[in-house]
Image: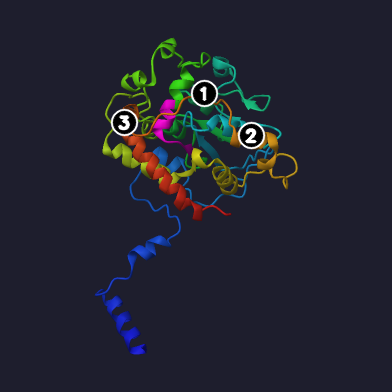
Amino acid sequence: IILIFLLISMLIMSGLIQPNSNLQKAVQPFSAVKTLTLPDSLEYNLADVTAPFGEADDVRGGEREVGRKNTPLYWHIPKAGGTSLRDFYRDEECYGFVWAASCPQGAQCLGMTKLKLDSNIPLVDTDSIEGLKHSKSLELVQSGFADIISATRAYDATDILFDPIHQGRMFAIFRHPVERAVSMFYYLQQATWESTYNPMYKDITIHDYARSSVTDDNWMVRSLVGKADNTGTPLTRQDLDVAIEIIRRKCVVGLMDDMEETIHRFNSYFSFRESGEQKNDKTKSPKCKEYITSGSNTNSHPPLEEGSETWKLLEQKNAADVILYREAEQIFKEQNSLIPH
């Protein structure tokens, strides 16, 4: 037996016999090895998910650390649980975080000459190019003013707000692009308060919407690679590869289909601390749990049958986003080994 073992070992070392690579791959922990170089602002302004945190990087409700080098950057994908997440972390009864996002007072925020709070809400706008530039002039990131910064324009927020010394740590909740498009359609039928509201939505069907030019066109990939305003312009394979590399190496992935596990991972990864008594599990508070189970800014609507003609139309228009979403699902599984349980 010993002779056989030695013989097999010699053959493996000589390369004539290969060990079971599939088995080795199955037991590998999550790895964020660089497979391609990203644009400079993404490569250097966003921390890798496996990079160590600094001593001042913990986020605790009501206690902002001036010395923080990494700021959580929530990439807000519309109709994917982002409003619920914001309310969950911002609510004083839950975490009480200072969460910067779109301006609660509209264009008035652009006239601010210093950082200011209104009921724990920063008077800045991190969803528009103009707002991002204004927030940069106020040193929103460098001051450590906000516990969490939310932005829909992932590339632009990274490029404008952050720098190699004050990096962002991206996290996001993903939802299937077709389901997201369907939810967006029914939401826009009644969301008169939204800038994107159009009364025409009330007079068309979901199939009409899917056939029209106003549906999403790979919104996620475009946001990640800086082509959010270039809808209609074909994406390249390089665009998709860059988008996949960003979420694999630079993003803590959550899934709307598994919100409880998603919240747990965000809390564990960022060492988020509740306001008040830290031993209380805020996810078990009835009010706080409702944000996770029932959500905010939700709207009921008829489901769209998967595989139907309308589903296929939306899927074709968002082919790159569908691929990205499938990658996100796989990364979510792999990152289980990255997050303490």
Of callouts 2 and 3, the N-terminal one: 2
Give the structural element (helix, strand or loop) at label 1.
helix
Towards the viewer: 170 or 311: 311
Mark nearest the camera among 1 and 3 is: 3
Give the extent of the magenta segment: 170-182
Quadrant of the drawing holding the N terminus: bottom left
The image quadrant that residue 260 belongs to is top right
Above or below, comparing residue 123 to residue 14 in the picture: above
Q: Residue at label 3?
A: 312
Q: Position of residue 273 (x, y in %)?
A: 66, 44
Q: For the image shown, how many numbered marks are present on the structure?
A: 3
Answer with the quarter of the image where residue 110 lies: top right
Does residue 295 lie above or below 13 as drawn?
above
Residue at numbered disc 1? 134
Determine the image quadrant of residue 276: top right
Query: Which residue: 46% across, 47% down?
Result: 332
Furthest-right residue in this view? 277
**Marks 1 and 3: CB-CB under 8 Å?**
no
Q: Position of residue 40 (x, y in %)?
A: 38, 40
Question: Is residue 106 among what the camera can see?
Answer: yes
Direction from residue 184 to residue 235 in the image, left or right: left
Which residue is more in the foreground, 79 or 130? 79
Q: At 39% across and 21% down in the image, what residue appears?
A: 206
Disc 2 is placed on an element classified as: helix
**Amino acid under label 1?**
His
Image quadrant holding the C terminus, namely: bottom right
Which mark, residue 290? Answer: 2
Name the residue type under label 2.
Glu
Q: Position of residue 23 (x, y in %)?
A: 37, 65
